[in-house]
Image (spheres, rainbow, N blue to C red):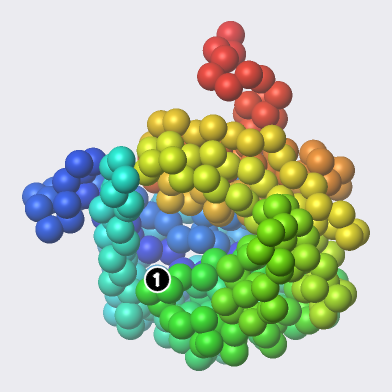
Amino acid sequence: MKKIVTLGEIMLRLSAPQGERLSQANQLNAHYGGAEANVAVSLSYFGYDSYFISKVPSNPLGLAVERHLKSHGVHTDYLQKGGERLGSYYLEAGAGERGSQVTYDRKYSSFSELKVEEVDLEAALQNASLFHVSGITLALSPELRELTLHALKKAKEYGVKTSFDFNYRAKLWSPTEAKEAILPLLPFIDICSCGELDAVCILGMEKATESLPPEEKLKYYYEKLTDLYPNIELLCSTFRTVISTSSNRLQGNLFVDGKLYQSNVHPINPIIDRVGGGDAFAAGVLSGVLDELDPDQIISFATAASALKHTVYGDCNPFTKEEVLKFAENESGKIVR
């Protein structure tokens, strides 16, 4: 069984009931999640040995996080204990044309204070097949930027395939700050999840011709990026058409060996919970790469995994590889008897 390692923050998510503003709510629903933790959970369900590097407080919330991860089959050997608080965020679900809103409460969290010397990267990356991290981790502190770069370099030393998801969050930092932190990492990345806005707004690439169709624009940016960083073997992203908060269309994109592959378009209606959809997509791509699938198969699987995530509450995607494959093969909504 292949060993997967992710590094990131896991938080307490508190959601207002559907149809209520956060400022009105008298009760909140609790879940646990975070980009890299969600990827680890998905890959655990896909049959891999998933390990999660993080730090949580030594209190009942930290214990709850540990139990959450273990309940989804994620190993917590490298989950550090310490600090004062678990980061959290509040979710106000949108409806119709009103979009959902996230309010963060994560400053001075235990994870944001994690230092390089606290993590045994040698042990964590030993015999690993893949290491995954996202830009969210970089946004949280200078120490985490140092840790992430150190971990990526160490992974390359050990021959571990590396994955990076830009995962830009405007509420955490500016495009200029993101560019400064991300550029030093790119020479050590094998698999990269980023879209047109990342290429233009963060990396500062010249815009593609406006009249080009979306897929040709994306291919233009991906060609530019792989010219600059030939070490990047694979690039991926999704096209999302938002009809309303509860109705989207989703299509996956995969760029490898100079060619762009696209999945079928998935109409998702109604959306039960969009949070974690991008992490489910990233995990699907990583699973396909680890299984050495053809590009068409990888992007079909990854987009199906993301579409399925939209149908369940919480940040995590609790579907097995077999369930995702059946969903990708069957007609939408068909009963499996």
**Residue 156 vertical position relative to residue 245 in the rendered view, above or below:** below
**Kind of residue sitting beneath label 1:** Val
Disc 1 element: strand
Residue 76 relative to residue 209: left or right:
left
Give the image location of residue 43, x and y in percent.
64, 49
**Residue 28 vertical position relative to residue 305 in the rendered view, above or below:** below
**Residue 5 vertical position relative to residue 305 in the rendered view, above or below:** below
Give the image location of residue 336, x and y in percent.
59, 13
Q: Residue furthest top?
A: 337
Give the image location of residue 121, x and y in percent.
66, 78
Q: Residue at x 69, y 79 (%)?
A: 205
The residue carrying mark 1 is 56
Give the quadrant of residue 314: top left
Q: Is residue 291 visible?
A: no
Residue 154 relative to residue 28: left or right:
right
Pointer 1: residues within 10 angstroms few (<14), some, or many (20+)? Answer: many
Q: Residue at x 57, y 15 (%)?
A: 334
Give the quadrant of residue 56: bottom left
Q: Residue at x 52, y 70 (%)?
A: 168
Residue 160 relative to residue 79: left or right:
right
Q: Residue furthest right?
A: 257
Number of marks in the rendered image: 1
**Residue 133 vertical position relative to residue 143 in the rendered view, above or below:** above
Residue 211 relative to residue 71: left or right:
right
Q: Residue furthest front?
A: 211
Q: Is residue 206 visible?
A: yes
On-image quarter of the C terminus: top right
Q: Residue at x 54, y 32 (%)?
A: 267
Give the quadrant of residue 10: bottom left
Give the image location of residue 236, x and y in percent.
71, 57
Q: Nearer the viewer, residue 46 or 309?
A: 309
Q: Nearer the viewer, residue 282 or 128?
A: 282
